[in-house]
Image (cartoon, rainbow, N blue to C red):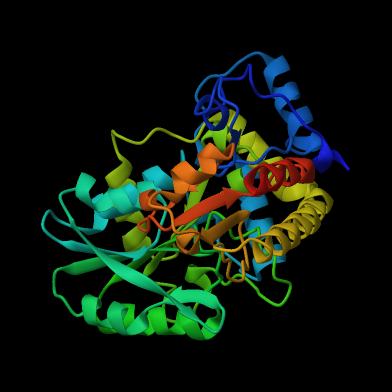
Amino acid sequence: MQFDDIIDRSSTYAFKWEKYKQRDILPMWVADSEFASPEPIIQALSQRVEHGLFGYTLPAHYAPANQAVKRWLSVKHDWDIKEEWIVWTPGVVPAFNVACKAYCSPGDTVLIQTPNYPPLRAAPALHNLNRVEIDTLEVEGRWTLNYAQLESAAKDPKCKLLILCNPMNPVGSVLNEQEMQKVAQICAQHDVKLCSDEIHCDLILDVTKKHLPAGNIAGLEQNSITLMAASKTFNIAGLGTSFAIIPNKALRTKFQAGMQGMVPWANIMGLVATEVAFTQCDEWHQQLLDYLRENLAFIQQQVDTIDGLRLLNVEATFLAWIDASGLGVDDPQQYFESKGVGPSPGIDFGDKNFVRINFACPKSMLEEAFKRFKA
């Protein structure tokens, strides 16, 4: 299978590989994969390059990409949207920063679940907003939100926005219908808008789980901004293209106003790649999920054999949030690196006792990582 192929990225200046350049450490940190994008995407980009002109393309005018998003959400997530709800952005990080700007004033409060990935945790302060963290709790072998804490924090009149990551990065949980209804109830009761980062929504690994887009939940349709992209799933993050789905016209207008003069259009290559990903790559997508499930099973088996490591059920994403507190070391990140493995440091996400392993790679790379760790 193509997912087994080792692709040399050492000469491409890839962010992931530059971190440990000229060091014998396997980079398993930032969330891009080691898999080549599907062939239809590569071919479509090649054809676009051969055309030779790369002038302005307004994403709203690029009908095939908008139609592809509508098709994908209907087929994969049972969500029938209107194309006018789509707002294209050059990444979900700019998008949730726009949400902070559009729906809050300096001094307001933004709720952020923790642990969470660094750019999301950093967003409120960039806009002179207060960040209040909502803990993630272990319940029946999986991670979920502390809903009592969420409701208490949402009562603050200064609280204007909740930014969720669902599926949750780094802990890998998928919020179920009951959990999403709790979020909807709390947001409605306390007039808090929801910005839901769902960039990992097409990476559901637990076959008993289903992703539920925020904008398709009763009570959230008119009170939410749903952020999505093909970038993680199809390994096209470097093309800088994502989209927000905002059914409420007033919210959408405010969001678009927040972008003016600061956020560039999504670029033509990213639009082409998204179009093809969402129309021609269904079979590749299924093969990817099957491969990631096998990798996850391998990681879980390995972690279970190592004293001091612990991993709860990963329902989605290609990221394993590993509890290393049992190792008895002051700095788990440094310890992993000393073994020749480079995960994401847990402290960046809000908990220094954890590390995050990216397992979107050939299985042989995982095998080498655990061989090093056990040595």
Whether 188 is drawn above or below 91: the answer is: below
Whether 360 is drawn above or below 115: the answer is: above
Residue 144 is left or right of residue 36, and the answer is left
Residue 211 is left or right of residue 168, and the answer is right
Query: In this rendering, does residue 238 appear at all?
Result: yes
Q: Position of residue 49 (x, y in %)?
A: 68, 18
Residue at point 39%, 61% (across, down)? 115
Q: Position of residue 264 (x, y in %)?
A: 40, 32
Q: Nearer the viewer, residue 76 or 38?
A: 38
Query: In this rendering, does residue 241 appear at all?
Result: no
Residue at point 29%, 49% (across, down)? 123
Q: Nearer the viewer, residue 200 or 309?
A: 309
Q: Position of residue 224 (x, y in %)?
A: 39, 67
Whether 70 is drawn above or below 5: the answer is: below
Whether 134 is drawn above or below 225: the answer is: below
Residue at point 14%, 69% (across, down)? 158
Which part of the image, by quadrant, shows the C terminus?
A: top right
Residue at point 73%, 37% (across, down)? 37
Pick out the residue farthest to the right. Answer: 1
Q: Position of residue 41 (x, y in %)?
A: 74, 35
Determine the image quadrant of residue 75.
Answer: bottom right
Which part of the image, by quadrant, shows the N terminus?
A: top right
Determine the image quadrant of residue 317.
Answer: bottom right
Q: Nearer the viewer, residue 307 or 169?
A: 307
